Amino acid sequence: MAKQFNRINEDHARFIAAQHIFFSGTAAAEGRVNISPKGMDSLRVMDPNRIVWRNLTGSGNETAGHLRQMNRMTLMWCSFATRPLILRAYGSARTLHPRDPEFAELNALFPANPGPRQIYDMSVEMVQTSCGYAVPFLDYAGERDTLDRVTEPLGQDGLHTFWAERNMTTIDGQPSNIFGDTDDAG
């Protein structure tokens, strides 16, 4: 049975911390809805109504583009281990880029990584739990190092080139603002 809460309680925070993967969902007013799996050590529950997660370099940049238009986000965790549970956090989020003053302080909450491109600072308005009885058991085999191996040799200039080629717009052509207001002219 689904239960709703107006905050992340201690049990929710422990459950979130125990998961190796979470999913983010965003959508603009028009176009495709995006759901992305996220892993690595990239999320922190800051307080009962605030989550920050660091978005690393990747092949797309849907979340940033969507949040420019529709400031709403859903994060979801589900247990693939012994406790059957699905937890969703609903709210709004702001996008912070490396050029923003608050980025460095929040980025320091996470392990060093060569390719952070955004941090999402989410205000949690509602938490919902549901049973998760149909979620299969899956064994955790470890983290992939592929992203680090691909981005580390690029250096900052190479990352900016990658972002310019692949992260300037969403798949629906909406700007992601990865380089600032100049994105709108591109």
Image (spheres, helix red, strand yellow):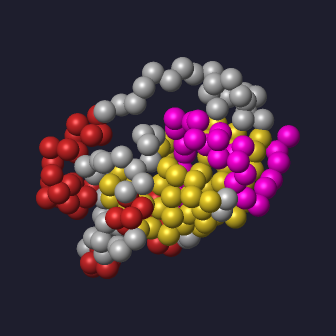
Q: Position of residue 66 (x, y in %)?
A: 48, 65
Say which quadrant the C terminus sits in.
bottom left
Depicted 123 relative to depicted 24: above or below: below
Residue found at x 32% / y 55%: 116
Please identify the quarter of the rendering in which residue 72 is found. Answer: bottom right
- Asked whether, in this view, residue 94 is left or right of residue 58, the answer is right
Residue 111 appears in the rendering: yes
Q: Position of residue 145 (x, y in %)?
A: 31, 33
Residue 62 appears in the rendering: no
Q: Which residues are magenta?
A: 1-30
Q: Position of residue 151 (x, y in %)?
A: 22, 45
Residue found at x 42% / y 26%: 142
As drawn, which residue projects farthest toward the right? 1
Please identify the quarter of the rendering in which residue 46 is found. Answer: bottom right
Residue found at x 70% / y 54%: 8
- Asked if the stretch drawn in magenta spans residue 11, the answer is yes
Depicted 34 relative to depicted 22: above or below: below
Please identify the quarter of the rendering in which residue 89 is found. Answer: bottom right
Say which quadrant the N terminus sits in.
top right
Q: Quick one: 169 or 180, which is closer to the camera? A: 180
Q: Quick one: 111 or 166, which is closer to the camera? A: 111
